[in-house]
Amino acid sequence: MEPEPEPFCVRGVVKDGQVVLSVSLPLPDGATVYVATEPPDQIPGIGLPGPMPDHEIKKLILALARRPDLMDEPNWREMLWGNRERLAS
Amino acid sequence: MNASPLRAGIIDTDLLRAMHRATNAAIEFATNLARDAGLRASAYSLMVLTAECRDDTDRELLTLLLEHSTIYPVSVHISRRALALLEAQPAPAALSVDAALVAATALVHKLPVYTANPGRYANLHGLAAIQPY
């Protein structure tokens, strides 16, 4: 039996009566979701848990780095930081 | 050669501020953490940074950061835990309210804290403070 997925809560805005989310949900087509105007108390954190998809990382990091000009660059990491090894934990 | 994947953890207010202000090392760390485990922060840190925003661009970037992070509300349980951390300090407490709330959030959710200054969280039993760069 498949384990129950970890509950999560994401933020959205209403446009013309429809909820528009800022991220794609990691749920299959046909999954039932519920919409509330306030986060339910039992949700530990608001936002998608776990690693972020590459395209979302790129959108966020280039905005924070004030480098939207690199949005179409596949090698944006190297262009920001060169070829240094990634930081250790 | 790649290092081990980063663990999930709460980004403290100072480190979140460094990301928001485009400090190069902080943004590079955010990139790696987002890829390995996702970004997590206390709602208190976001309140602090929201109050510090200087213009609409600052607000827009903070909103974007919020939308790409898991934000942990300051629950009753976390507030009590933070108060207990402060009360356990000899007066005057060396621990700030900010650090107490971030530490309590991490302890309640069983996560480490990512911080540029691990000394802020010294002597807090059960809390792992990780300096990422």
Image (cartoon, coloured by chain):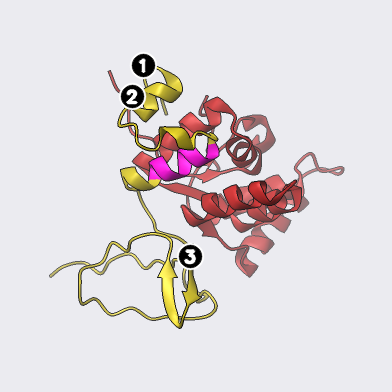
Chain colours: A yellow, B red
Q: Does the magenta stretch include residue B66?
A: no
Q: What element carries label 2?
A: loop
> What distance separates the C-alpha of mark 2 from that of mark 1?
14 Å
Which dot marks residue B13? none
Q: Mark 2 points at which residue?
A: B3
Question: Which quarter of the figure is the N terminus of chain B placed in?
Answer: top left
Q: On screen, A65 above or below B125?
A: above
Q: In the image, which is nearer the foreground, mark 2 or mark 1? A: 1
Residue located 62% across and 31% down the image: B118
Residue B82: % across, % down: 68, 55
Q: In the image, which is nearer the foreground, mark 1 or mark 3? A: 1
* Left or right for B106, reference B102: left
Q: Name the residue under label 1.
A: A83
| Chain designation of label 1 | A
Q: What element carries label 1?
A: loop
Which residues make up the magenta segment?
A: A57-64
Residue B36: % across, % down: 35, 40
Q: Which of B124 and A10 is in front in this view?
A: A10
Amino acid type at image mark 2 = Ala
Which dot marks residue A44? 3
Query: Are there few (<14), some (14-19), or many (20+) residues within 10 Å of tag 1?
Result: few
For this orientation, the residue located farthest to the right is B92
